């Protein structure tokens, strides 16, 4: 592999992780890696800690904003060991906007010493696992599925673009020192049951809410039965549980995977100590898991595939960062070999990386897919983010991806079910939900290759940061909007009241709208588009009349993606606070980064009493933040009532909000 200017460096895993005898013998794997990276605070559960970030990744849909913010920080190069900029989300290129963004990202990468992965090279998480993932390192990515890297033994965390920009500038990343749960895997998966079913089982147990501040650590004899890509499928969808990240040990299987990628030197053995103490231990016997599916419209609606037996299927999509590895796609190819897909089914297959596609071509899997009637899609996010392959009205769509939120496929009335590649392939043949164990098809055995095809020619490795590079800015690329310091009082209106589990896809739709990621005033027109298309017009009116917009939410507000536009665009529209029953980790960090105050209801009755259109006042809110208050009084002028809302913020977070956001605070210092 070529050497990267910003790789290697001071914190080499081989040299910094002490030998077993030197350590206390009761550490979790998480504690071992975090304690090697802690730069601020102490390893006390529940307290805020700052960690050093070794690697970063960005993708184009969040990356343009992240690099605009990095530019605003005025540094001349990135300070990480390795930073990679991927182009994988907006590759549809209808109109000039996507291509302009790509050129911007390429020029920024050359200027600041960042590796650039060109469109066509594959989905960031899959490619990163193949070519850069290193056990024991920390990875921060501007995408919520960055925990895919946990499959190779990294502490890999998703965050907003601004946090990634700060990490690229050498700043620490702050998290709550996590609770660590051990998932003790025993047994072995039965034929036709795969890693996707394991993580769906986990979602059935843990659901999509209530897991903020947790790291899931997989251990036990069952680990050895899973390959690195299978482990990565499991850590990838930890994002759907809302955990900080998930991690597997680094063992012989990891070494073999790295060797097959020509990177054996990046391997190091890592596991928890035998007496490690966990906050919770869950036993999971792999041999008891059945083929599962997540029914519409949440990855947490897990049911057995057998319960859906016979239900007609209109579309099958295989791919996404969850299930697009060589093993996944070869399994599908083997199932389809010599067969034809059902005439009522459209089958799309998007290989996770160019390496996967090249391997499939070499091994003959590609012609098996084509022979069966599959439509080969670009190695990119594509169908998963709804910017292509939208299903027909009311369709039943089976997808190997990780999110089935309403409308995410691009068709609001479609019913998307999340399934394994095995279940997807069998349904493509039968035209209906089918328990693959009973389909009478020979079970495909796919071995992990001893050697992957290695061709890094779609990366552009910077020789070094080159300050002479001119940054290309097309007309779609605007400056990130700024926010004034927090006013003395909040005086506004409840512009919208929403229920539980509002995802960032509800707040800031992706799909066809994603091309405006670099143009905040334009993208802001679509905030809450699918929930209430009048939101934008009303919010602008309130903002322009000099008042503030207030959003009211239920449980787990801001689930799903890391897209900071779900905070940035509301900020642009003059939203000053969101009062919710609870928030998800990445979204709450994004709100604070952009100067929006997250307040939490103390009782359900307070939530019930608030209505859209209520006039709200929070007097002396600035003073309350300055004094470190952990509660504010919310006056409902319309109803003539008031209640106390919780404000749990660290000192640093309060400073950020007072300044109008993280960038404003950085500029002050
Ligand atoms: C997603 O899967 O929702 C995305 C698109 O990858 C997002 C990032 C984005 O919105 O750009 C994510 O998961 O963070
Ligand atoms: Fe891309 Fe889908 Fe993965 Fe998000 S979840 S990174 S859109 S493949």
Image (spheres, rainbow, N blue to C red):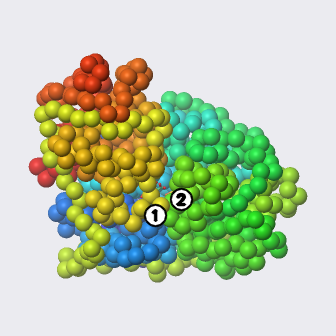
Query: Dot 1: few (<14), some (14–19), or many (≥20) neighbours within 10 Å?
Result: some
Q: Disc 2 on helix, strand or loop? A: loop
The first of marks 2 and 1 along the sequence is 2
Residue farthest to the right?
440
Q: Which residue is mark 2?
A: 410
**Residue occupying the point 36% across, 38% down:** 496
Asked whether, in this view, residue 426 is left or right of residue 400, the answer is: right
Whole-percent x, y for residue 593 in the image = 27, 46
Q: Which residue is mark 1?
A: 512
- Which numbered circle lies on residue 397? none
**Residue occupying the point 43% across, 54% down:** 509
**Residue occupying the point 48% across, 53% down:** 145
- Dividing the picture into quadrants, the one containing residue 625 is top left
Above or below — where is 339 with respect to 403? below
Whole-percent x, y for residue 635 in the image = 24, 23
- Dividing the picture into quadrants, the one containing residue 608 is top left
């Amino acid at each position: 592999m070529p050497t990267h200017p910003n790789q290697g460096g001071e914190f080499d895993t081989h040299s910094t992780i002490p030998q077993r005898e030197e350590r206390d013998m009761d550490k979790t794997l998480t504690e071992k890696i975090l304690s090697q990276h802690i730069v601020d605070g102490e390893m006390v559960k529940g307290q805020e800690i700052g960690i050093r970030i070794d690697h970063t990744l960005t993708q184009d849909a969040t990356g343009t904003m992240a690099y605009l913010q990095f530019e605003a920080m005025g540094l001349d190069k990135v300070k990480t060991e390795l930073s990679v900029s991927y182009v994988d989300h907006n590759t549809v290129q209808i109109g000039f906007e996507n291509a302009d963004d790509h050129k911007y990202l390429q020029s920024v990468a050359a200027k600041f010493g960042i590796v650039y992965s060109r469109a066509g090279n594959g989905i960031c998480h899959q490619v990163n696992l193949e070519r850069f993932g290193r056990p024991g390192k920390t990875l921060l990515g501007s995408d919520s599925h960055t925990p895919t890297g946990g499959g190779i033994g990294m502490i890999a965390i998703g965050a907003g673009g601004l946090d990634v920009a700060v990490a690229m500038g050498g700043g620490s990343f702050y998290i709550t020192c996590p609770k660590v749960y051990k998932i003790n895997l025993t047994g072995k998966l039965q034929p036709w049951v795969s890693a996707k079913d394991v993580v769906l089982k986990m979602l059935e147990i843990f659901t999509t809410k209530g897991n903020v501040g947790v790291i899931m650590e997989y251990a036990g004899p069952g680990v050895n039965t899973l390959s690195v890509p299978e482990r990565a499928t499991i850590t990838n969808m930890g994002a759907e549980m809302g955990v900080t990240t998930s991690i597997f040990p680094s063992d012989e299987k990891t070494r073999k995977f790295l060797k097959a990628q020509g990177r054996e030197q990046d391997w190091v053995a890592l596991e928890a100590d035998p007496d490690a103490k966990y906050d919770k231990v869950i036993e999971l016997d792999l041999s008891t898991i059945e083929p599962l599916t997540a029914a519409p419209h949440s990855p947490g609606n897990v049911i057995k595939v057998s319960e859906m037996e016979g239900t007609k299927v209109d579309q099958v999509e295989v791919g996404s960062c969850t299930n697009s590895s060589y093993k996944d796609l070869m399994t599908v190819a083997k199932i389809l070999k010599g067969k034809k897909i059902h005439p009522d089914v459209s089958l799309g297959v998007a290989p996770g990386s160019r390496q996967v596609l090249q391997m499939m071509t070499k091994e003959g899997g590609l012609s098996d897919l084509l022979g069966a009637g599959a439509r080969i899609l670009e190695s990119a996010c594509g169908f998963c983010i709804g910017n292509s392959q939208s299903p027909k009205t009311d369709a039943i769509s089976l997808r190997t991806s990780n999110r089935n939120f309403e409308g995410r496929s691009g068709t609001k009335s479609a019913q998307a079910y999340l399934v394994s590649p095995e279940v997807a392939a069998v349904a493509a043949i039968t035209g209906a939900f089918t328990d693959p164990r009973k389909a009478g098809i020979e079970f495909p055995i796919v071995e992990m290759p001893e050697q992957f095809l290695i061709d890094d020619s779609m990366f552009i490795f910077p020789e070094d940061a080159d300050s002479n590079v001119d940054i290309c800015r097309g007309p779609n690329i605007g400056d990130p909007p700024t926010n004034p310091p927090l006013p003395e009082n909040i005086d506004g209106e409840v512009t919208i009241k929403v229920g539980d589990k509002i995802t960032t896809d509800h707040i800031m739709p992706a799909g066809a709208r994603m091309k405006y990621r670099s143009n905040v005033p334009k993208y802001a027109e679509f905030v809450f588009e699918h929930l209430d298309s009048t939101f934008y017009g009303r919010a602008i009116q309130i903002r322009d009349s000099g008042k503030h917009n207030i959003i009211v939410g239920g449980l787990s507000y801001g689930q799903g993606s890391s897209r900071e536009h779900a905070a940035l665009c509301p900020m642009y529209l003059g939203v000053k606070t969101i009062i919710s029953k609870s928030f998800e980790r990445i979204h709450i960090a994004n709100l604070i980064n952009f100067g929006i105050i997250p307040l939490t209801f103390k009782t359900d009755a307070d939530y019930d009493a608030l209505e859209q259109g209520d006039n709200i006042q929070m007097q002396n809110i600035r003073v309350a933040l300055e004094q470190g208050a952990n509660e504010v009084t919310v006056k409902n002028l319309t109803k003539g009532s008031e209640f106390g809302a919780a404000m749990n913020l660290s000192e640093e977070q309060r400073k950020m909000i007072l300044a109008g956001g993280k960038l404003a605070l950085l500029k002050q210092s």
